[in-house]
Image: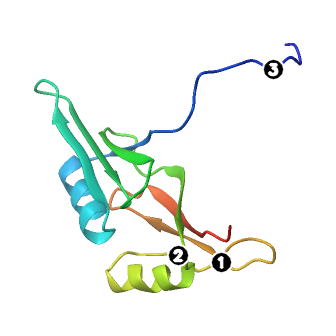
């Protein structure tokens, strides 16, 4: 493999997919408990449904893909202006959240899971 730089026309990330066992339940969790917006809910034939949600105003959406490989660490980090305030608010809404982590030189963060056990991180945006 050469050290030369390759070029691409990729400009952004539009959607990140996560596996869910029930798209309706996942949609309710993301729009109800988390307060996300439903962006798309389309059926393509009898056996395929494309559902996307996103935080209000976010550029990147999350696709709720019907599948069997649920309970994954998604690698998705949702950004918030105040991790402690969001941690408290999510607990008050009945969302099971992990410990609020505060490490030197690292933004405050914590983990939460959706009803399928897919794991996400909330990270304070310190930029």
Q: Secondary structure at mark 1?
A: loop
Q: How many marks overall?
A: 3
Q: Secondary structure at mark 2?
A: loop
* Residue 101 in the image, given as x and y percentages of width and height: 65, 78
User: In the figure, is residue 28 to the left or right of 59?
Assistant: left
Q: Nearer the viewer, mark 1 or mark 3?
A: 3
User: In the figure, is residue 62 to the left or right of 123?
Assistant: left
* Residue 19 in the image, given as x and y percentages of width and height: 37, 43
Query: Which residue is the site of mark 3?
Result: 5
User: In the figure, is residue 98 to the left or right of 32?
Assistant: right
* Image point (86%, 17%), residue name: 4
Query: Which residue is the site of mark 2?
Result: 98
* Pointer 2 with pointer 1, Cβ within 8 A: yes
Q: Earlier in the sequence, mark 3 or mark 2?
A: 3
Q: Nearer the viewer, mark 2 or mark 1?
A: 1
Residue 101 is labelled as: 1
Q: Which quadrant is the C terminus positioned in? A: bottom right
* Residue 82 in the image, given as x and y percentages of width and height: 55, 80
Camera-nearest residue between 4 and 101: 4
Instruction: Say above or below: 70 vs 103.
Output: above
Q: State the CA–CA distance, disc 2 to disc 1.
A: 9 Å
């Amino acid at each position: 493999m050469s050290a030369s730089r390759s070029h691409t026309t990729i400009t952004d990330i539009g959607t990140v997919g996560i596996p869910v066992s029930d798209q309706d339940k996942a949609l309710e969790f993301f729009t109800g408990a988390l307060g996300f917006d439903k962006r798309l809910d389309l059926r393509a034939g009898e056996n395929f449904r494309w559902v996307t949600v996103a935080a209000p105003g976010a550029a990147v959406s999350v696709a709720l893909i019907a599948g069997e490989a649920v309970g994954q660490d998604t690698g998705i980090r949702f950004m918030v202006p105040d991790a402690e305030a969001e941690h408290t608010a999510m607990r008050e809404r009945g969302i099971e959240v992990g410990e609020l982590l505060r490490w030197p030189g690292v933004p405050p963060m914590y983990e939460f899971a959706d009803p399928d056990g897919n794991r996400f991180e909330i990270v304070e945006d310190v930029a």
